[in-house]
Image: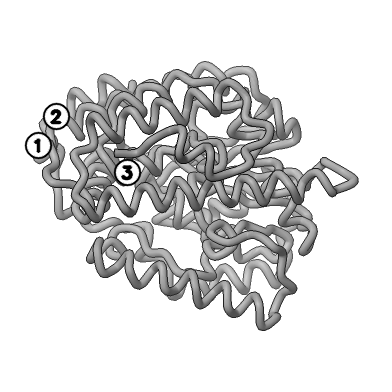
Amino acid sequence: MLEKAKIKDSFELSDEGVSFDEALETLIHSINNEANLTFLGEIAINFQIKQHLKNRELISRKYKTLKTEKVSPPIIVIGLPRSGTTFLFNLLSKDKKFRSPLFWEMLNPLPLVKNGSYKEKVRIIKSKGILFFKELYIPKLDDIHNINSLSPEECLLIKVLSLQSILYYYMANTPTYLDYLAEANKRESYLWHHKFLRVLEENGKPERWLLKDPSHLGNLEEILGVYPDACFIHIRRDPSETLPSICSLTKQVRGGFSKNIDLKELGQKTLDFWAKSNEKNESQKSNLPEDKYMSVEYEDLVEDPMNLIKDIYANFSLEFCEETQTNMFKYLDKGKDEARIPHKYSLEDYGLSRGEVHNKLNFS
């Protein structure tokens, strides 16, 4: 059993705010009463929460010492999970003008270390150790979502600073917490997101930040409240293909930590959450001009990625230099298959139908 008081007493949690306290209480209640974790699962999620709060404490202290607050404008890739966001994100990351937080930086951001230093190498090795144990307890996860220490990663690993991250739902059956995430105001989450990026900029300020996380979907207003110069690339794919994939990923993650998994409950909760996120997003994007928000199609990414990239650069008035094109072509030679997700699962496995998914997500 996790105890809120013990967790809070372990840290000097400054700048908590009402939403942080609510997030912590909801998360702990949901874990204790709904997750049905194994002994290993309880240890793992307890460790995760404490590690996230430790990083929050360190970020808070460092941020207070900085003289300026503004960070470089972000370009944010959004879309339903498993809709090609990772492939597009990785392709865009070949532009050296962009910078994305790396996996090891998200795990152990502070104290800051110099690029290429011995201390940085130690951090990278430590993150590789965590990935080793991840593979040990969640085998074949890399077949669904490959992670390595030096790869850019999703912002869900930054949102843990405010305990408003869908990561916890992936790890454990926490439906009450997921309902909270669907309705909660995420402004505090993005304030901490901003603090994290600002601290990383002490080691190098990029021309633009390149970010990605499906759970940014439906949070446009909160994001723009913190990053008024943000631009969005929304990739669209048939949700009847993406939903079983994200359910499969969740099942794979939970398999290492849970006593049992109700696949039909998982399917319904996943569909409901992303339907609400998508509905919010459709409403919020209507107020944004084309030079701030661009919708692209998954099929175009797969069939002619470089042509789509050229359209994206033109839409946001970005320089598309020869070096960037060369780097992207090299990546395509190795990585195009990342956009073609193998189908070893079905909607029916999770009690869903194609018609129901299309109806809830307004897809035609």
Decide which of tag 1 and tag 2 comes sooner along the chain. 1
> Please, which residue is most extreme toward the bottom here?
118
Under mark 3, the amino acid is: Tyr
Q: CA distance from mark 3 to mark 1?
A: 20 Å
Q: For this view, does 32 lie left or right of residue 213?
A: left
Circle 3/circle 1 CB separation < 8 Å: no
Q: Secondary structure at mark 1?
A: helix
Identify the residue position indicated by label 1 in the image: 348
Residue 123 visible, this angle: yes
Q: CA distance from mark 3 to mark 2?
A: 22 Å
Decide which of tag 3 and tag 1 comes sooner along the chain. 3
Q: Residue at x 35, y 48 (%)?
A: 45
Q: Position of residue 272 (x, y in %)?
A: 29, 23
Circle 3 residues within 10 Å: few <14, some 14–19, many ≥20: some
The image quadrant of residue 12 is top right
Q: Residue at x 48, y 44 (%)?
A: 156
Q: Position of residue 88 (x, y in %)?
A: 50, 54
Considering only vertical position in the picture, is 306 above or below 264?
Answer: below
Q: CA distance from mark 1 to mark 2?
A: 6 Å
Under mark 1, the amino acid is: Glu
Circle 2 residues within 10 Å: few <14, some 14–19, many ≥20: some
Q: Nearer the viewer, mark 3 or mark 1?
A: 3
Identify the residue position indicated by label 3 in the image: 170
Residue 77 visible, this angle: no
Identify the residue position indicated by label 2 in the image: 353
Q: For this view, does 105 lie left or right of residue 356?
A: right
Considering only vertical position in the picture, is 210 above or below 25?
Answer: below
Quarter holding the N terminus is top left
Quarter holding the C terminus is top left
